[in-house]
Amino acid sequence: MESLPIQVQLGYINYIANGLVNEEVKRTVDLSTHIAKITAEILLLNQGDSAVHSFILAVEPELAPNLAYVGASVKGDEEEDGILELKQTMIQGQSGEFYKVQLPSSLAVGAKLRVKVETVLSHILRPFPTHITQAERQLVVFQGNHYLYSPYPTRSQTTRVRLASKTVESYTKLGNPSKSDEAIEYGPFRDVAPFSEDALKVHYENNTPFLTISSITRIIEVSHWGNIAVEETIDMRHTGAFLKGPFSRYDYQRQSDSGISSVKSFKTILPASAQDVYYRDEIGNISTSHLQILEDSVEVEVRPRFPLFGGWKTHYILGYNLPSYEYLYTLGDQYALKMRLVDHVYDDQVIDSLTVKLILPEGARNIHVETPYPIDRIPDQLHYTYLDTFGRPVLVASKNNLVEQHIQDVVVHYTFNKVLMLQEPLLVVGAFYILFFTVIIYVRLDFSITKDPAAEVRMKVSSITEQVLTLVNKRLGLYRHMDEVVNRYKQSRDTGALNSGRKILEADHRTLTNDISSLQARLKAEGSDLADKVGEVQKLDGQVKELVCRSWQEAERLVAGKVKKEAYIDNEKTLSSKRLELVTRIDSLLDTL
Amino acid sequence: MAEHHTATDSKHKASLNAGGSLHGNSRPNAACGGGGKGGLSGGLAQPAGWQSLLSFTILFLAWLAGFSSRLFAVIRFESIIHEFDPWFNYRSTHHLTTNGFYEFLNWFDERSWYPLGRIVGGTVYPGLMVTAGLIHYVLNLLHLTVHIRDVCVFLAPVFSGLTSISTFLLTRELWNQGAGLLAACFIAIVPGYISRSVAGSFDNEGIAIFALQFTYYLWVKSIKTGSVFWSIGCCLSYFYMVSAWGGYVFIINLIPLHVFVLLLMQRYSKRVYIAYSTFYIVGLVLSMQIPFVGFQPIRTSEHTAAAGVFALLQAYALLQYLKNRLTKQEFQTLFFLGVSLAAGVVFLTVIYLTYTGLWFCIKNVNDERVFVALYAISAVYFAGVMVRLMLTLTPVVCMLSAIAFSSVFEHYLGDDMKRENPPIEDSSDEDDKRSSGNLYDKAGKVRKHVSEQEKAEEGLGPNIKSIVTMLMLMLLMMFAVHCTWVTSNAYSSPSVVLASYNNDGTRNILDDFREAYYWLRQNTDEHARVMSWWDYGYQIAGMANRTTLVDNNTWNNSHIALVGKAMSSNESAAYEIMRSLDVDYVLIIFGGVIGYSGDDINKFLWMVRIAEGEHPKDIRESDYFTPQGEFRVDKAGSPVLLNCLMYKMSYYRFGEMQLDFRTPPGFDRTRNAEIGNKDIKFKHLEEAFTSEHWLVRIYKVKKLENREPLEHKLRSIVPRQKYTSKKTSKRKRGHIRNKLVLKKGKKLNKK
């Protein structure tokens, strides 16, 4: 807008210079929803002296404040429409909004070109009456222009108005229009002068949902771990006729046409790969929604907690996750994110105010944004979330008055050093390392300021006694092994096996006894009275050993046939009972340890 | 032979468990005498630390089990604050996190108790909010962006883990490590505690039980060591408890009682003196720092016992000191001895009548076991007085039953394993439950000969032992199953969201409360005042963010009575009250459509009673009953009831509604009656919103009309025809003789 005067000058000159004429205009004013979609098919004819490269689109000054979107395309022979570039400009002496449209190729003198101009106006349908009761139907008024508002003269023009219902209270009757079911046909009008206006007014019934998103904040959080989280915080309002008087649930449930203009639910279409969809508000999950996974999209039936009547509003948060491979492109350290700047919320949506926050990974640099249409950038912010140290860059942008045509892709280029991916795991590893290290330090080192020698001795003694206990138990176990060896010998009568077994066991026994006595010595050194008890255990153990040896000999003698079996059994009995007694005494001694 | 083989087999296992197993040898003795110490020193002396690893694992698992069994509601529904009081706590925590601590302490909430308002900072125990706020702050400092709501929802389950650890510590001090671990497992899943600490139940008790147990642990520790360090720790923990819950009074009475009984039992020592003196002075000063408590500790009667015991202890210490100095004080010690003996006898007889765990404790009495005995008795008393205080009983029951189980297992399981290979060892879940079971592995196997003798000594057959053990294990298993079942069925409903189940098992969520509250939040004026019965005050403030007249902090009875009076008067009288209170909307709960029993008509008699208490001239409870003394909503109901505001609001247009074909229109499912007044018209109110299942109905109070229309027709004054009498003109009128003639004065027009 800084170069305003020049543009004005240019525009003015252009208008004077080129001799364009609207040869044939077909206008369609679609009023079947809560927005007005005006499409005009214009056949441009160059009657000037030279070829033209651009033409001017004009919007009526009355409608300009409601203008949400304007676009032009060339109606080619092939199916595809060539979308034309628009640039806002001004024309001296005329009010309204003007756009200069660059033609794909210059239009020679006498040549014709068919262009299609699409204009979307929001908040243009005014409910009248402004307040209705629950039982009443919603009537709205549209005020527009019969003619195409254009800086060029028009040779021939028709206007077709599409309505939402058959019920029409009144409409302007310029040129005796014909009215069919849900449409009114005006024209054809011949030879209309430039900038001609004639008020078109239609008052008709329109019960389509008059929903308006008064504000939406769309947060896109990109993670290089494979996920893109999208969250939309939406403030929504029913901008139709206000509800007057009570809201009766009884009528609403029993009569199908009660509250016909209210909105019960609407559908939001999410990308096909959307996962973990959530729909909630400040007080928790909104349990009245349904999710339907279709082939090419995910459809959420968003149902607010309560039906929305005229003037009622609601607020909710809708979020989901997307796999990043569908939207994130990479080449070395270069990344490009291609995502919709604003996404579908409901059909024919109107967004009064949009804020987009793009959270890029921590460490993204050289950020460059390509937007499909001009959008106000707000200074970048930093965002801190899990395991962030210096913050993630956040791109913030806002725009007012958007409609469905604004659902277009934004491309964000940035560079990101892949080594930084390791930062987060290393942080976790480091934290755990420090934690364990502190615990180790704390447990291993003695932090007490005073020393307690008695406690130290006690701990030493207890550790020694424990070792003694293990060894004694092991030794007792050995005896049982010896018994086993003897039993086996009695059956196999293999003296060699017996002797070898005995030798091993005796060696084990000796080492154990030696160990115990060395421990006993250590106990004595610590000055513990437990040493005596251990000594006693040793003494008893010696007796046990003796008994075992005797039973051994007895067995040998039995095998050799020197003793009768009965005598041996008697002998064995007394021996084992003696042994049992000794073991019990050892046990009781051990228990006191 | 087979026995030998198994013995060798288990040798490998035994060597694995060598650390723990050896300790088992000394265990049977540990049961009598210094049991607590035995467990502790044994654990520390293990170089390999098997025991500590096991304890750590068990505690960790107990924490995990406690945490996850509290998540039923979150999994079934969502992460949401439950019930009523938690909504206030959540709202004030939210206020704390958004506005800072000092703003929170100075918070005057003009959105409640309209038009009075409420000084929130001075009338709450801030511990809960500060804890949640602190956790939130720390997490956000570490860039863990957690919403404060999630912190609030999961605070109680997290603290249940801390509670089980502090219970472990306390029981370990009182008995031994094994019992401590059992107690930790018990408290982790015991329903009495779960009932107040499921996820979403963001209430004081959730953290207070932790503070309670931890304070007691530190107290026992300080009594045992006599160290000022532990006493100060105890004071800090007590301070936390004071800041968290009004139940701190329980501590400040139980600890003095403990000291007192110790004095009576002639167990006075320097340790007791140091511990209690420190605790009382520092604890008193700290507790007075809480604005809500203020000077109560030195003014109110609940705290006098503590002061009295403090004075007594000082006097007793002085006497002791004097006794040491002057020998002629003997009569005094005699006196104390006599008193303490008598008291002790009475005391012991009382205690013998309580639990087995208690019995075990008393059997091996020492300072800290006196404490647990007192704890149990007083908690039983409080639970008897007020069911809600069952909460204080729960931990001590857990501890005592853990002690009982532990002792029983020590007797039965220990011997059992000496006989043959333990059956316990193989079942893996037992290892979680009982570390003590593991400690017995080896000793038994080696000494198989011994056990035969021991068996004879104890006179218990192996069968009896195994049966008892199995029964105990069954009991434990049943307990775990029971706890889970109770938690899942009784305590895991948020009560904000209702669920109903269809015949095919699918679930219907009735989200009417939030629907209506959210409607209020979005579609009414920001400063609109909502009148409702006090039960819903906190929820309206929390979810709808609108000004309420009365709420669950029932500090002003006359205000509640006024609301009750408005609800129970007829419409025009109620309108007067509502106008005087600036009411914009009236919110009621009506369950007649879906058969929800906790609705306002069922609570209505309480409104009438409370209103009658303050306004006996206008409201009389008897008016709302039929002559037969019944409370009915059908045609036979009393006309006063059928025309009062609450009735009209509940049943407005309900008379036209036919729920199914078997019942007449206007059939109330909750009370199973066809309503008596089907033709309800409002003059001063209009229906503003009714939720989908009619559970919540909101009415708008209309502003005064410009001119109130007359109810009756204007009196038409027809000029009376002149009556012509047949009498003579003289007698046309009555005539009084000597009548004074009144002279009409004339206005002076000109001066």
Image (cartoon, coloured by chain):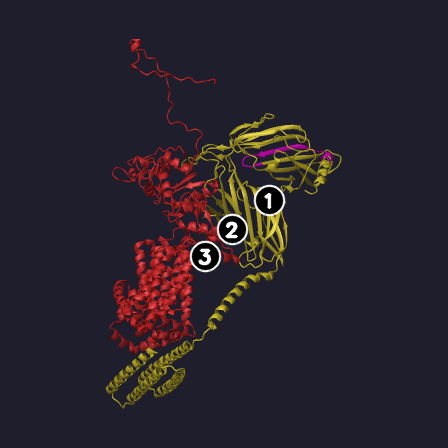
Chain colours: A yellow, B red
The one of B39 and B308 positioned closer to us in this rendering: B308
Judge from the rendering whether residue B312 lies leftward or rightward of residue A51; answer left or right.
Answer: left
Q: Is residue A20 magenta?
A: yes
The amino acid pointed to by label 1 is: Lys
Judge from the rendering whether residue B455 lies leftward or rightward of residue A88; answer left or right.
Answer: left
- Residue B652 placement: quadrant: top left
Q: Nearer the viewer, mark 2 or mark 1?
A: 1
Total labels: the figure holds 3
| Whole-percent x, y for residue B395 in the image | 35, 60
Mark 3, residue position: B131
Question: Same chain, marks 2 and 1?
Answer: yes
Q: Nearer the viewer, mark 3 or mark 1?
A: 3
- Is residue B627 visible in the rendered image? The answer is yes
Q: Separation of disc 2 and disc 1 at Cα?
A: 23 Å
The amino acid pointed to by label 2 is: Tyr
Judge from the rendering whether residue B527 lies leftward or rightward of residue A151; answer left or right.
Answer: left
- Circle 2 marks a residue in which chain? A
Q: Separation of disc 3 and disc 1 at Cα?
A: 41 Å
- Which part of the image, by quadrant, shows the C terminus of chain A? bottom left
| Whole-percent x, y for residue A578 in the image | 27, 84
Mark 2, residue position: A320
For this orientation, the residue located farthest to the right is: A49
Mark 1, residue position: A399
* Magenta segment boundaries in residue numbering: A15-36
Above or below — where is A342 with respect to A184?
A: below
Crowdedness near tag 3: few (<14), some (14–19) or many (≥20) residues, C-alpha within 10 Å: some
For this orientation, the residue located farthest to the front is: B751
